[in-house]
Image: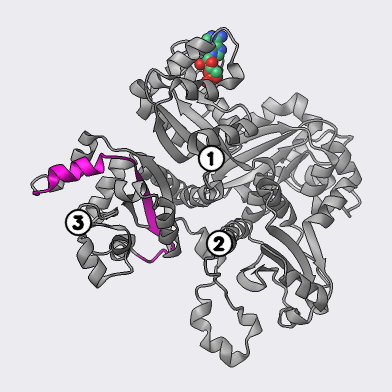
Amino acid sequence: MASKKKEIALQITIGNQEHWEEMLSSKGLMVVDVYQAWCGPCKTVVSLFRKIKNELGDDLLHFAVAEADSVDALENYRGKCEPTFLFYAGGELVAIVRGANAPLLQKTILNQLIAEKKVLDQGAKREVIKDEALFTKEEEEEEEEENAIMIHAEDELVPPKKSCTVAIIKPDAVAHGKTNEIIMKIQEAGFEILANEERTMTESEARDFYQHRAREEKFEELIQFMSSGPCHVLIISKSRDDEDVIPAWREFIGPTDVEIAKKEKPESLRAQYGTEVLFNAVHGSDNREQASRELAFFFPNFRKIDKTTEALHNRNLERTLALIRPEILKEKKDEILQKIREAGFSIAMQKEVMLTEEQVQEFYREHTDKDYYPALLQHMISGPVLALALVKEHAVEHWRRILGPANLAEAINKAPNSFRAEFSPKESAINQFHGSTSQEEAEIELSFFFPVEYTLATIKPDALAEHQDEILEKIQSAGFTISQVKETCLNRDMAEEFYKEHRGKPFFEQLVNYMCQGPCLMMILSKENAVEEWRKLMGPTNPAEAQTTVPESLRSKFAKSILQNAVHGSSNKTHAMEKIQFIFGDIDLEQERISQEKQMDYILPEEE
Ligand code: CMP
């Protein structure tokens, strides 16, 4: 019952032209599922929409369903069988997604929400589009070119092989409080910001960075200037895959000499924000080689992430969701996991969960009217379910093949060696396993059980000095994305606040001293299930215990004692958000999530 109520609240129903016009006047972003009466609204995406709504909790995000036949404005959508999602903001059409493509829908919602917020908060221009379905034939031909820029599923799913470069907002622009303004202009000009790190270069770093200019007359001044205060170091790429970011960025920032920039390219960043040759506000790499060197200089791990992603794509790896139902879980879990591994799957994530009736209903939304549903529901809530993210080439199809037919009698007769035949108790009417039916469904289902999360991770001072590279390597090969990173020297007040939950404990004073003894590396890690996954990778607080129970964990390998235990991680999602804000301030995690999606399409399988 509770879920029915939620369902109504999630998507408003647009039943006629009047409702449609009311909808157009609503504030924020409205995602409308346009459906045909005979097939009803698209059910597969509802749990995704609910998840996004729950996670963002954003008042500006709305969902609706509209039957094409009953709304005049949707005349041109009548009789189309493909699910169509229209995105409206300020009464205007801003994006269209055709097909129940979960990753694309998710990405479009987040992008459009950010864009609409910029429109509402900062007066940015709303990018309005037209849908070819609303055009006449001739207009359609004329607009062909325009339509080519509409989002297509294939484009979005191709792994990114974009050119990247380093951009620096220099200390003068940062000191003048221009950082946010410049960042907005960069984004509006079609650049994507894949990383953004505030840092103050030491003199020796600045010398190293500008070594190729050591013979120049103003070199010493340049070094002094670049190390005089914080700058923002960005990794940027172009939103369009076919554009080379390096010349585009150089063009955008304008000539080095601010006076020339003002005369020849008054709209360039240097013309707007620079004051003289030296204080020219922004930096850009000259060419590909220099960009590579600068990327390696500031972000030694960036390319590693890229390579990992590429390797997974090249190996054609796929993920699927597997569920093992409660009835056999208790007795057969180890045997089944063993068989799954023998079949060549890696278990990238696993989680035992007690589902509520509402959750089962949401997950099996498409099955609720089937005669087997009541029995399925009873099974699913009778104890913990084991959810697994399985990784392998063609994982979806392979997992379904070894499961055998969904109907138990058929499985036993036709595929006696299948998992469903082998592991289902004779008296049971319900098979004991679930597998996603397509890659799209797998992504939706995986996000149901393993939503993407953020956590705050810290490499503590001694471990940072001694094992930084090894720890970063392990973080990345466990499939985390390092969304933000900041080397931070905590002072006593900050350390006490950071660990305020431990105030009053006998080790609190020692802990504060330890954390202040040198710089720590603060990171925002993101991954599905990140809070729990990072705690798993760290291992138990006490390294003695870590060594016996999880010998591969970070604390087992790098901790010196229960106090000096190398790494820290938030203990739950609320703490994670609180500490992220404490260390990084108000940052836009949605933007982080988008850049993260661009870097990591798959998580890495865990090494057993
Ligand atoms: P962390 O996970 O960062 O959370 C609190 C920290 O306090 C912990 O890691 C250790 O560094 C430290 N700590 C926890 N328990 C003890 C203990 N019994 N003795 C000394 N230090 C501890």
Disc 1 residue type (three-letter)? Ser
**Residue farthest along the top direction in this orientation:** 506
Q: Quick one: label 1 or label 3, which is nearer the N terminus? A: 3
Q: Which residues are magenta?
A: 217-243
Q: Residue at x 65, y 66 (%)?
A: 99
- Disc 2/disc 3 C-alpha distance (Å): 34 Å
Kindly report which numbered mark, 1 or 3, lies closer to the viewer in this rendering. Answer: 3
Q: Which residue is mark 2?
A: 115
Q: Residue at x 50, y 37 (%)?
A: 524
Kindly report which numbered mark, 2 or 3, lies closer to the viewer in this rendering. Answer: 3
The 10 Å Cα crowd at callout 1, few under 14, some 14 to 19, many 20 or more, is many
In the image, residue 352 lies at what x, y percent? 71, 31
CB-based contact (under 8 Å), mark 1 and mark 3: no
Helix, strand or loop at label 2? It is: helix
Q: Which residue is mark 3?
A: 277
Disc 3 residue type (three-letter)? Val
Q: Which residue is mark 1?
A: 526
In the image, residue 229 lies at what x, y percent? 31, 40
Q: Residue at x 55, y 46 (%)?
A: 589
Front in this rendered view, residue 169 or 402? 169
Q: Quadrant of ligand 1?
A: top right
Q: Look at the image and tell me whether residue 575 can be seen.
A: yes
Q: Residue at x 69, y 52 (%)?
A: 48
- Disc 1/disc 3 C-alpha distance (Å): 40 Å
The 10 Å Cα crowd at callout 3, few under 14, some 14 to 19, many 20 or more, is some
Helix, strand or loop at label 1? It is: strand
**Vertical arrangement, residue 587 with respect to residue 142, above or below:** above
Q: Look at the image and tell me whether residue 211 can be seen.
A: no
Helix, strand or loop at label 3? It is: loop
